[in-house]
Image (tube, grey):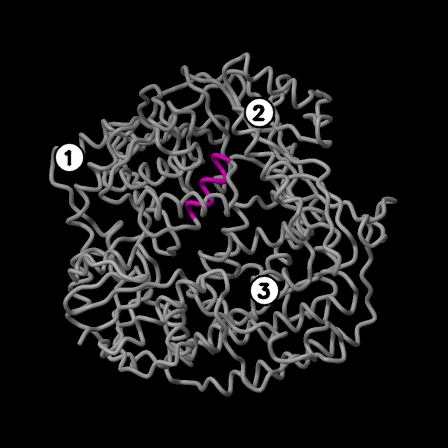
C-alpha cells in the first residue's frame, strides 16, 4: 500500500517526488515504492456559478436577488479539468491507503487540497505536510513529522468561510448594480476599496493649495553651506525671516561651532517579496504588476532560475543558508560575475538581517535557485526581472557599506549654517548600486538614505570663516503624487491610513494579514480595474474614470473601505483558532448580503454614460462608448450583454524618432500608422522599412506577433456580464 501526496504546483510536486524517490512517471503523477506524488495547478475547484443552481439565476433580474443558496456547491474549473481528473484517478486507486496534503502551508493552500478531495468523494485518512520551504532538508524533516490533517480542520473552515463570503457579497452586489443601471458595474471587498484609495488621493490633490517656502545657500571656505532654523529645519515659509538671515550672513565673519565625525554603516535593502519586486520593476522599467508576475512565473516554472514568486516574506529560513554558495555560483555570467567571485572566496553565512524562520509564513523571500542560465536565452523583460532578483540577493550577502559622515555647524550673525559630507571607506553592498548605475539602472533612494557621497574641507571648532553673498532659494510645496502601479501596490499592502475607523485592533489586523488582497491577487485586481474601464493610465499615473467615480457613489458604503476586510480577517482568524464558529460568520454575511442588495435596489442614484459617441454598434445598434484602456483607446457597446468592442489605438513600445515617447498605433489594415503626441506620424509599412534598414528595433516577427495579439484581444468581450462578473470575478 502507498500514500498519495498532493502538492499545489507541479514544480513543488517534482521536488517532493525527487526527495521521496518517486521516479516512475504516470497519469499526472510520479510514483515510487512507498509514495505516489501528484499535484494541482493552483485551484482546480471553485464555487459553482449562480446559473448552476437553477433557472431563476440564469437571467439577471433584480427580483431574483439576493442569491442565497441554502448550501454553496463546488465545481471543477474547466480550464484545468484534465489535471483534476488525473488527481482524482490517483486518489481512487485501491493501493492508496491514505492522502498526504502537501499544498502550501496556509489558509488558501488548505482550501486547494480539501476541495479536490471533497469533490472527488474520497474518504481515506489524511495527513498534513506543513513546511515553509521546499529544500530537500525541509521536505525530509516535514515527512518525518507529518501531522494529522484533523488538526487543520478549523483552518479549512476559515478558508471556506472566506471564499463563500466573497461569493455571496461580491456576486450579489455586482449583479444588483449591473441590473439596476444596465451597465457592467462590479464591486467587491478588495477592488472597491482600491478605487476608494485612488479617489482619496485625487481629492487630496484637488484640495491641495501650494505654499511657497524659502531656503538660503551661501559660500564660505570652499564649501556651500545651508541655513538652518532654530528647530533644525532647512527652510521656512516666512520670506521675511530668510531675508533677515541673508542680510546678517552676507559678507560677514562666522565661527565654526561644532564638527561631528561619525563612523556609519548602511545595510542592504531587504530581499524581495512579490510586492516589492513589482514596485521596483514598475519604477525602473515601467512594467505593470501583471507583467512582472508573468515574467516571474516563467522564470520560476520554465527556466527554474528563481524561487516561488507569490510570497509575502522578505526573509529566508535557516535551512536555506547551506544552499547559498550554490545559488551564488548560479548567478555568474552577467554584470554581477565579479561580485559572485568575491563572495565565493570566503564562507557565505546567513545573519538575522535576512534569515529568520519566524518571519516566513508560507514561502520564503524570492531568491535565485541553484540552476544557472545563459542570459541571452531570456527575453528582455525576463532578463530585467531576473537581474533584479540577483542584484538584491547578492546585495544581502555583501557586507554593509562603511563610511565616515561629517557634520559641521557654524554661527554667523546669530544665524546657524550647516554642512554635511560623506566619505565611503568600504563600499560593501553599494557595489551593486555601482553596477546598476553603470548599466543605467539605479533604484530610487531608500527611505532614510544617508547623504550623497562627497568629501568636504577639513574644519576645526572655533575656525573663522568669511561668508559670501547669501542666495535665497525658493520652492513650493507639492501635492501628493498620483498613484503609479508601484505606489498603488504599496497602498494595497498597507491601507491603514485610508481607514476611517479609529479602531486600533482593526488597523493592527489589517497590517498583520497583509492588507487588501494577497501578493498573488493584487496584480489581477489592478488589471481588472483597467479592463473594466474604472481606472485609466496617463503616462505612468493612475486616475479614476467617470465610471470608477460613479461606481464608488453607487456601491454600498461598507464595500468602499478596507475596514470590511479587516473585520472579516479578525473573524476568520478566530474561526481558524476555534474561538468562533463558521456558521455564525456565515449567518452574518448572509444578513449583510440582504442589506446591500436592498440598499442598491432602493437607491435613487443613477448611472450616466458620459463617454457616448455618435457611432452605432454594428451588432445591436446602440450607441458606442469610447473608453481609455490601459494600453490605448477603444469603442465598446454600452449594452452589457452585447460585448462588442473595437480597438481605435494602442500604445506600443515603438519610440517616436523626434521626442522618443511611446507612439500609438491607429487605423486598420494597410492604413495603420503610428502617431505621437508631439505630432509625428508614420505609416506602419514605413516604420517596418525604417527599422529593417537601420538593423535595429522591432523585427518583422515581433510586429506580426504584436498584430496577432491586437486582433485576438479585439475579439474578446470586455464587458460581458456573465464572463467578466461571474466566472472570473476578482474580489
Instruction: Please tell me which residue lies in front, 483 or 473.
Output: 483
**Residue topped by disc 3:** 727
Image coordinates for residue 244, horizontal then vertical, percent: 60, 28
Q: Earlier along the polypeptide chain: callout 1 or callout 2? A: 2
Cα distance between the residues tagged 1 and 2? 56 Å
Magenta-drawn segment: 276-285
Instruction: Please tell me which residue lies in front, 36 or 128.
Output: 36
Q: Earlier along the polypeptide chain: callout 1 or callout 3? A: 1
Instruction: Please tell me which residue lies in front, 631 or 39.
Output: 39
* Quadrant of image for the C terminus: bottom right
Q: Earlier along the polypeptide chain: callout 2 or callout 3? A: 2
**Residue topped by disc 2:** 246
**Residue topped by disc 1:** 344
Q: Which residue is drawn at 48% across and 70% down?
A: 76
Circles 1 and 3, Cβ within 8 Å, touching? The answer is no
Circles 2 and 3, Cβ within 8 Å, touching? The answer is no
Whether residue 259 is visible to the viewer of this picture, yes or no, is: no
In this view, 514 is above or below 291: below
Choose top left, top right, bottom left or bottom right for residue 119. Answer: bottom left
Q: Residue at x 17, y 64 (%)?
A: 32
* Quadrant of image for the N terminus: bottom left
**Mark 3 crowd level (few <14, some 14–19, many ≥20, 10 Å Cα):** some
Image coordinates for residue 307, horizontal then vertical, percent: 31, 49
Q: Horizontally, is 664 left or right of 318 in the view?
A: right
Q: Horizontally, is 581 left or right of 68 in the view?
A: left
Name the element at disc 2: helix
Q: What predominant SS class does the magenta segment belong to?
A: helix
Image coordinates for residue 55, horizontal then vertical, percent: 68, 79
**Mark 2 crowd level (few <14, some 14–19, many ≥20, 10 Å Cα):** many
Q: How many labels does the image show?
A: 3
Choose top left, top right, bottom left or bottom right for residue 122. Answer: bottom left
Amino acid at each position: 500500500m502507498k500514500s498519495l501526496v498532493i502538492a499545489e504546483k507541479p514544480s513543488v510536486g517534482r521536488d517532493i517526488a525527487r526527495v521521496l524517490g518517486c521516479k516512475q512517471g504516470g497519469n499526472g503523477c510520479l510514483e515510487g515504492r512507498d509514495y505516489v506524488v501528484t499535484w494541482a495547478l493552483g485551484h482546480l475547484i471553485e464555487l459553482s456559478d449562480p446559473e448552476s443552481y437553477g433557472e431563476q439565476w440564469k437571467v439577471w433580474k433584480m427580483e431574483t436577488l439576493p442569491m442565497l443558496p441554502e448550501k454553496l456547491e463546488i465545481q471543477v474549473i474547466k480550464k484545468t479539468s484534465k489535471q483534476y481528473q488525473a488527481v482524482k484517478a490517483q486518489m481512487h486507486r485501491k493501493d492508496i491507503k491514505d492522502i498526504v496534503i502537501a499544498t502550501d502551508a496556509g489558509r488558501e493552500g488548505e482550501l486547494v487540497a480539501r476541495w479536490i478531495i471533497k469533490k472527488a468523494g474520497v474518504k481515506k485518512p489524511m495527513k498534513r505536510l506543513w513546511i515553509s520551504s521546499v529544500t530537500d532538508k525541509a521536505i525530509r524533516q516535514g515527512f518525518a513529522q507529518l501531522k494529522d490533517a484533523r488538526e487543520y480542520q478549523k483552518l479549512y473552515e476559515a478558508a471556506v468561510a472566506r471564499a463563500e463570503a466573497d461569493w455571496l457579497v461580491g456576486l450579489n452586489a455586482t449583479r444588483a448594480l449591473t441590473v439596476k443601471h444596465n451597465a457592467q458595474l462590479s464591486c467587491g471587498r478588495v477592488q472597491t476599496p482600491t478605487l476608494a484609495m485612488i479617489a482619496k488621493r485625487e481629492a487630496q490633490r484637488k484640495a491641495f493649495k501650494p505654499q511657497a517656502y524659502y531656503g538660503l545657500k551661501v559660500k564660505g571656505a570652499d564649501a556651500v553651506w545651508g541655513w538652518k532654523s532654530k528647530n533644525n529645519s532647512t527652510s521656512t515659509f516666512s520670506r521675511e525671516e530668510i531675508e533677515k538671515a541673508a542680510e546678517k550672513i552676507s559678507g560677514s565673519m562666522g565661527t565654526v561651532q561644532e564638527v561631528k565625525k561619525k563612523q556609519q554603516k548602511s545595510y542592504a535593502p531587504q530581499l524581495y517579496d512579490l510586492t516589492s519586486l513589482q514596485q521596483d520593476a514598475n519604477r525602473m522599467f515601467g512594467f505593470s504588476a501583471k507583467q512582472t508576475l508573468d515574467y516571474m512565473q516563467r522564470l520560476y516554472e520554465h527556466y527554474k532560475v528563481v524561487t516561488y514568486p507569490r510570497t509575502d516574506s522578505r526573509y529566508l529560513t535557516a535551512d536555506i543558508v547551506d544552499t547559498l554558495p550554490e545559488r551564488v555560483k548560479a548567478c555568474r555570467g552577467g554584470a554581477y560575475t565579479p561580485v559572485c567571485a568575491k563572495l565565493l572566496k570566503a564562507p557565505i553565512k546567513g545573519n538575522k538581517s535576512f534569515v529568520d524562520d519566524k518571519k516566513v509564513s508560507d514561502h520564503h523571500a524570492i531568491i535565485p535557485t541553484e540552476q544557472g542560465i545563459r542570459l541571452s536565452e531570456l527575453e528582455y523583460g525576463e532578463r530585467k526581472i531576473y537581474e533584479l532578483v540577483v542584484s538584491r540577493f547578492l546585495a544581502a550577502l555583501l557586507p554593509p557599506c562603511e563610511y565616515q559622515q561629517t557634520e559641521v555647524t557654524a554661527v554667523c550673525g546669530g544665524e546657524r549654517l550647516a554642512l554635511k559630507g560623506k566619505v565611503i571607506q568600504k563600499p560593501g553592498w553599494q557595489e551593486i548600486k555601482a553596477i546598476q548605475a553603470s548599466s543605467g539602472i539605479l533604484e530610487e533612494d531608500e527611505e532614510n538614505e544617508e547623504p550623497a557621497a562627497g568629501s568636504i574641507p577639513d574644519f576645526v571648532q572655533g575656525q573663522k570663516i568669511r561668508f559670501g553673498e547669501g542666495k535665497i532659494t525658493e520652492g513650493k510645496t507639492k501635492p501628493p503624487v498620483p498613484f503609479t502601479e508601484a505606489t498603488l501596490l504599496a497602498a494595497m499592502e498597507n491601507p491603514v491610513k485610508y481607514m476611517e475607523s479609529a479602531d486600533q485592533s482593526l488597523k493592527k489586523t489589517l497590517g498583520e494579514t497583509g492588507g487588501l488582497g494577497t501578493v498573488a491577487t493584487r496584480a489581477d485586481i489592478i488589471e481588472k480595474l483597467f479592463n473594466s474601464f474604472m481606472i485609466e493610465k496617463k503616462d505612468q499615473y493612475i486616475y479614476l474614470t467617470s465610471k470608477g467615480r460613479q461606481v464608488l457613489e453607487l456601491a454600498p458604503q461598507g464595500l468602499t473601505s478596507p475596514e470590511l476586510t479587516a473585520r472579516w480577517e479578525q473573524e476568520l482568524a478566530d474561526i481558524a483558532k476555534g474561538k468562533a464558529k463558521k456558521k455564525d460568520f456565515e449567518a452574518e454575511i448572509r444578513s449583510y448580503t440582504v442589506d446591500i442588495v436592498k440598499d442598491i435596489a432602493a437607491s435613487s442614484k443613477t448611472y450616466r454614460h458620459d463617454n457616448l459617441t455618435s457611432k452605432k454598434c454594428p451588432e445591436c445598434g446602440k450607441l458606442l462608448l469610447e473608453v481609455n484602456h490601459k494600453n490605448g483607446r477603444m469603442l465598446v457597446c454600452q449594452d452589457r450583454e452585447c460585448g462588442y468592442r473595437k480597438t481605435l489605438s494602442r500604445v506600443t513600445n515603438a519610440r517616436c524618432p523626434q521626442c522618443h515617447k511611446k507612439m500609438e498605433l491607429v487605423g486598420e489594415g494597410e492604413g495603420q500608422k503610428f502617431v505621437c503626441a508631439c505630432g509625428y506620424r508614420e505609416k506602419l509599412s514605413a516604420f517596418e522599412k525604417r527599422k529593417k534598414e537601420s538593423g535595429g528595433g522591432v523585427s518583422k516577427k515581433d510586429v506580426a506577433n504584436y498584430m496577432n495579439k491586437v486582433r485576438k484581444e479585439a475579439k474578446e468581450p470586455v464587458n460581458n456580464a456573465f464572463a467578466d462578473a461571474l466566472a472570473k470575478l476578482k474580489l
